[in-house]
Amino acid sequence: MKKITISNTDLVVSRINLGGNVFGWTLDEQKSFEILDTFLARGYNFLDTADTYPWWVNGVGGLSEIIIGKWMKSRGVRNQIVLATKVGAENKEHPFDVSRKHILESVDQSLKRLQTDHIDLYYTHFDDEKTPIEETLSAYDEIIKAGKVRYIAASNISPNRLEESFEVANKNNLPKYVALQPHYNLVERTSYEQEYLPLVNEHNLTVFPYWSLAAGFLTGKYRNEADLNKSVRGEDVKKYLNDAGFKVLAALDKVAAKHNCQLSTVSLAWLLAQPHIGAPIVSATSDNQLQTLFAAPELQLDAEDLDLLNNSDK
């Protein structure tokens, strides 16, 4: 099992980042504990959640953090985990919000749910596009100095606001984002590669892509309209049932057959082969799914594989 150090930090993380969006949604507490136990037992240490997961279930979220907090407490493993959570997303009680007031309130609520005294990596989950960047970074400065957060990272922020964040941080001696969590996978490449990658290069950010398997499309489970009924994510993948999407699946089929592995393993291995990628964020709801994730850091794609996958949507 391979690990990587997040740029500009001392955080050493596993090359798979377990997504906690399913905890309290498609997985109850017991099943979540089983997944987390297996993940840690295999030597993986990087957990990703958010204060609003899964708000689409109960209107406000918090369930994922509660489950992770109970698990870490019951197992006594907080010091073995690199823990990432987020602030700023909307739910049924409030809109997108990265104001000082919201950040200071939210971090304390997250710490209580997670039953810990610090968060290793705290993301701006969504930018509200209106709070002055200096206000947001100053709030982060407060909670870092208070020992509540170690490092900050960014997710759904426009390229312009992300660039401005570094300018404001440099000018005012405020904390800088050390990582980026973009929407990036084999069927969602344009936005990240054209708009964000130059900023990643310039600021030496470590990248942790979300929707790494395109809501399950890159597992090969969805091949036609009838397959959309196979899970709650069916509607999310409908847009990929087109010529470009089928070409990507065909390339994945070929590479997976060559290496005798699952399509999801190849999809994640492709991400891991890209510059600056630290760990794809992936959720799992069964032991079988976990095993396909664990195989990804060990799969070495050769130049022929990468060429086929890189040009699969053409």
Image (spheres, grey):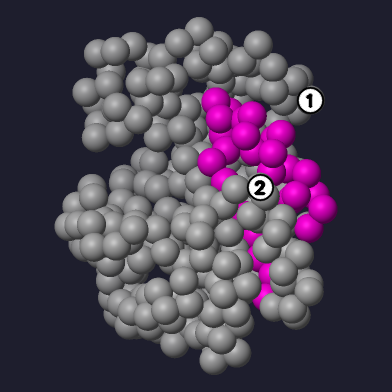
Compared across the picture, whether 198 is left or right of 209 comes to: right
Q: Which mark is residue 162?
A: none
Percent coordinates x, y for residue 214 in the rendering: 46, 33
Q: Earlier in the sequence, mark 1 or mark 2?
A: 2
Residue at 45 percent of width and 11 percent of height = 242
State the residue position of label 1. 303
Q: Quadrant of the C terminus?
A: top right
* Above or below: residue 206 compared with residue 240: below
Magenta range: 175-203
Question: Answer yes or no: do the residues labelled 1 and 2 have beta carbons within 8 Å?
Answer: no
Q: Say which of marks 1 and 2 sits in front.
A: 2
Q: Helix, strand or loop at disc 1?
A: helix
Residue at 68 percent of width and 75 percent of height = 175
Residue at 74 percent of width and 20 percent of height = 307
Q: Taking the image as drawn, is residue 212 in sight?
A: yes
Percent coordinates x, y for residue 277 in the rendering: 67, 48
Does 267 lie within the magenta span?
A: no
What amino acid is labelled 2 in the image?
A: Pro
Compared across the picture, whether 259 is left or right of 129 comes to: right
| Structural crowding at the residue carrying mark 2, measured as other residues with C-alpha within 10 Å and reported as few (<14), some (14–19) or many (≥20) | some
Compared across the picture, whether 58 is left or right of 206 comes to: left
| Structural crowding at the residue carrying mark 1, measured as other residues with C-alpha within 10 Å and reported as few (<14), some (14–19) or many (≥20) | few
